[in-house]
């Protein structure tokens, strides 16, 4: 499990097609501490397995399933910035919200309007995720735990503080960029639990 608190912004070093996987190496320093070979790591909010790791970075293999369900097919190119977070320790502080690292859909940045040092981020979402959006609710955008500030047709806006802009890949975001979205898992459980009652009504 993750919390959506980005530990480090890494940089894609290589991305090579190898048979049925995309082999990616990411340059990073902070998150490699204690990251074993075979360990889990969230890359832009998607839980991946570090197949190789050293002091300068780590490597992951992405299957067609992962590429089909995320924004990685277009975005994992050399030089791209990615948000990184190691799994939460059992004795760790819970600072963000529950993030499983399971991408629910791909959104599109409509705009990142800066106001002084802060900004407002507007994101379009796939139709099947719209019902989960709640004002002041939680959502993970590229693995960043954010609070929905406002709802719009087929999308939402969030207020981004200067620290988040400086310490995530949002500092390089542009309109049209695709982003990985994970909605609040609690909303999915609530929907599942009330579904039988709703069908009887």
Image (tube, rainbow, N blue to C red):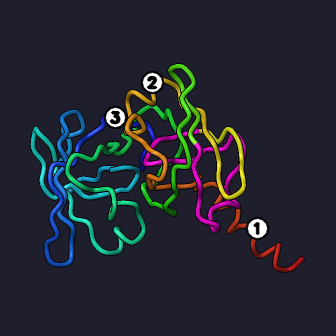
How packed is label 1: few (under 14 Cα within 10 Å), some, or many (20 or more)? few
Q: Is residue 49 left or right of residue 155?
A: left
Image spot of residue 178 (x, y percent): 45, 56
Image spot of residue 136 (x, y percent): 69, 39
Q: Is residue 87 left or right of residue 123?
A: left
Between 190 and 125, the one nearer to me in the picture = 125
Residue at 82% across / 73% down in the picture?
Answer: 197
Q: CA distance from mark 3 to mark 1?
A: 36 Å
Secondary structure under the numbered disc 3 in the rendered image? loop
**Residue 163, numbered label:** 2
Q: Is residue 195 above or below residue 1?
A: below
| Residue on which disc 1 sits | 194
| Residue on which disc 3 sits | 7
Residue placed furthest toward the top: 116
Residue 124: in magenta span:
yes
Quarter of the figure with residue 9: top left
**Residue 121, numbered label:** none
State which mark lies toward you, 1 or 2.
2
How packed is label 3: few (under 14 Cα within 10 Å), some, or many (20 or more)? some
Bounds of the magenta segment: 122-146
Residue at 43% across / 48% down in the picture?
Answer: 142
Image spot of residue 98 (x, y percent): 52, 47
Q: Is residue 122 left or right of residue 81?
A: right
Say how many tags the image has.
3
Regarding residue 37, the answer to whether it shows in the image is no
Q: Is residue 184 above or below residue 95?
A: below
Q: Quadrant of the C terminus?
A: bottom right
Residue 191: in magenta span:
no
């Amino acid at each position: 499990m993750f919390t959506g608190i980005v530990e480090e912004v890494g940089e894609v070093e290589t991305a090579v097609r190898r048979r049925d996987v995309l082999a990616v190496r990411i340059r990073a320093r902070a998150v490699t501490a204690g990251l074993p070979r075979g360990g889990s790591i969230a890359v832009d909010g998607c839980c991946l397995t570090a197949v190789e790791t050293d002091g300068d970075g780590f490597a992951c293999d992405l299957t067609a399933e992962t590429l089909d369900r995320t924004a990685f097919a277009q975005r994992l190119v050399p030089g791209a910035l990615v948000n990184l977070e190691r799994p939460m320790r059992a004795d760790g502080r819970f600072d963000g919200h529950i993030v499983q690292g399971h991408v629910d859909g791909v959104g599109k940045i409509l705009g990142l309007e800066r106001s002084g040092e802060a900004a407002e981020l507007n994101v379009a979402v796939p139709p099947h995720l719209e019902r989960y959006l709640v004002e002041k609710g939680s959502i993970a955008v590229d693995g960043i735990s954010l609070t929905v500030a406002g709802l719009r047709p087929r999308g939402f806006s969030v207020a981004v503080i200067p620290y988040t802009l400086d310490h995530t890949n949002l500092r390089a975001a542009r309109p049209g960029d695709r982003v990985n979205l994970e909605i609040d898992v609690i909303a999915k459980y609530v929907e599942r639990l009330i579904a039988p009652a709703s069908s009887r009504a």
